[in-house]
Amino acid sequence: SKDEFMRAYYEFSEGKYLGNNTPQLLRKFKKREYIRIGLRDLQGKTDFEETGRDLSVLADLSLQVAYEYVDQKMKKKYGVPYYKEKKEVEFAVLGMGKLGGLELNYSSDIDLMYIYTSSKGQTHTTEDYPNTRSISIHEYFTKLAVLLTKTIREITSNGNVFRVDLDLRPEGNSGEIVNSLGSLETYYQSWGRLWERQVLLKA
């Protein structure tokens, strides 16, 4: 389960969960888990469905940790994104395609879409995050989405965590890397084609 993966990663990080070396820890953890999952597969102790689910939950765990890591870095620099200065704006990663269907294979990339609740507001300093620079909500989540993608996709001496494909977002490569719920609603009602709605079924 994702909880078991999370506990395993926490133990693997040796108490340095969300430390500066998080991107490298994720890469090493992914390699370790690929060996474990692959050995069980080769020994016939699992089936295609369970293997696909394990690989997908590993990707889910990796995205969760990477998001928490970049969210912390962003808030330290820009403060907390608030909707009309009252409520923190929420962010989500949608797993599309094989990830959404829990059927990744060993060579799969992960299809993602980034969304946030509202662009009406800006970032603010808080007691936990003082001395920050205020920016708009959209700029904040654009920067966060770029950093999140880099954390997962960038190839280092330890390889990458997963290849990331963002082409299923509205307008594909020419579209915004992240969208608010309001802009998504407008897009799918006004311009989104049938297949673009259909791909959401696996999200």
Image (cartoon, helix red, strand yellow):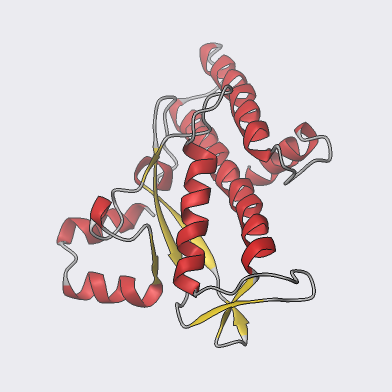
Q: Nearer the viewer, residue 192 or 16?
A: 16
Give left or right: position of 197 versus 76: left
In the rendered image, residue 124, in percent from the top left (x then y), is placed at 64, 78
Give left or right: position of 182 versus 84: left
- Give the image quarter of residue 99: top left
In the rendered image, residue 103, in percent from the top left (x then y), is placed at 41, 37
Up/down of 66 relative to 121, above or below = above
How many numbered marks have been drawn onto this rendered protein structure? 0
Q: Residue at x 23, y 58 (%)?
A: 171
Q: In the rendered image, which quarter contains the N terminus?
A: top right
Residue found farthest to the top: 43
Up/down of 106 relative to 58, above or below = above
Give left or right: position of 77 versus 112: right
In the rendered image, residue 37, in percent from the top left (x then y), is placed at 57, 23
Q: In the rendered image, which quarter contains the C terminus?
A: bottom left
Give left or right: position of 130 versus 66: right
Q: Nearer the viewer, residue 6 or 121?
A: 121
Q: Residue at x 49, y 73 (%)?
A: 137
Q: Residue at x 24, y 61 (%)?
A: 197
Up/down of 145 relative to 189, above or below = above
Q: Residue at x 55, y 88 (%)?
A: 84
In the rendered image, residue 50, in percent from the top left (x then y), is placed at 51, 32
